[in-house]
Image (spheres, rainbow, N blue to C red):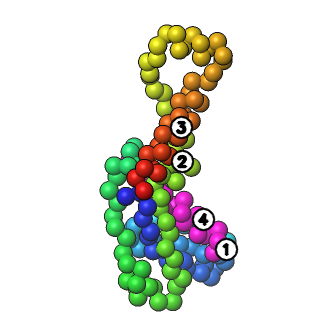
Amino acid sequence: MSKLYYPAVFHVSEDVGGYWVEFPDLPGCFSQGDTIEESLEHSKEALGLYLDQSEDFFQTEFQQPSSFQKIMNQYKDEIIMLVEYDAKKYARKYKTKAVKKTLTIPQWLDEEASAHHLNFSRILKDALIAKLETIQKDHL
């Protein structure tokens, strides 16, 4: 499951202005912002940082969110929003560290590609992205 929606509680910060945000399902997951829009954006990042604790986000099991109605009943005087956590979107934005891979190709292919000054890493990355997009379309 790569997408989850967690209820977030947006509290008005009376003393300094703006909003602070908590996720009742996720102890210690907080955020803040000067405006409701900024608070929402920051809460998406906080949610991703909180949930993204493993090396392989495709294998991670996440705590299921509470129902929106349950959170609304608990926080009657606050602003409640569902904040999306999309593991793939999060990974594409924040997990950009290059990872070295060793691969084997025929010698003739290496020589010809090198003669044309082709960037092996870029070509492999582009080909993998295209292949994954094809696989995703086939599963729809």
- Gap between marks 1 and 3, in whole Å? 31 Å
The magenta stretch is 35-54
Q: Which residue is mark 1?
A: 35
Q: Secondary structure at mark 3?
A: loop
Considering the whole magenta stretch, tell me its main secondary structure. helix
- Gap between marks 1 and 2, in whole Å? 26 Å
Numbered tag placed on residue 41 in the rendering = 4
Numbered tag placed on residue 97 in the rendering = 3
**Quadrant that contains the N terminus:** bottom left
Residue 23 found in image quarter: bottom left
Residue 109 position, x and y percent, is 53, 14
Label 2 neighbourhood size at 10 Å, few (<14), some (14-19), many (20+)? Answer: few
Q: Is residue 126 left or right of residue 56?
A: right
Marked residue nearer the N-terminal end (1 or 3): 1
Marked residue nearer the N-terminal end (2 or 3): 2
- Gap between marks 2 and 4, in whole Å? 16 Å
Q: Relative to the observer, which residue lies in front, 12 or 138?
A: 138
Q: Up-down: is 19 above or below 84?
A: below
Residue name at image x 53 percent, y 37 percent:
97
Residue 96 found in image quarter: top right
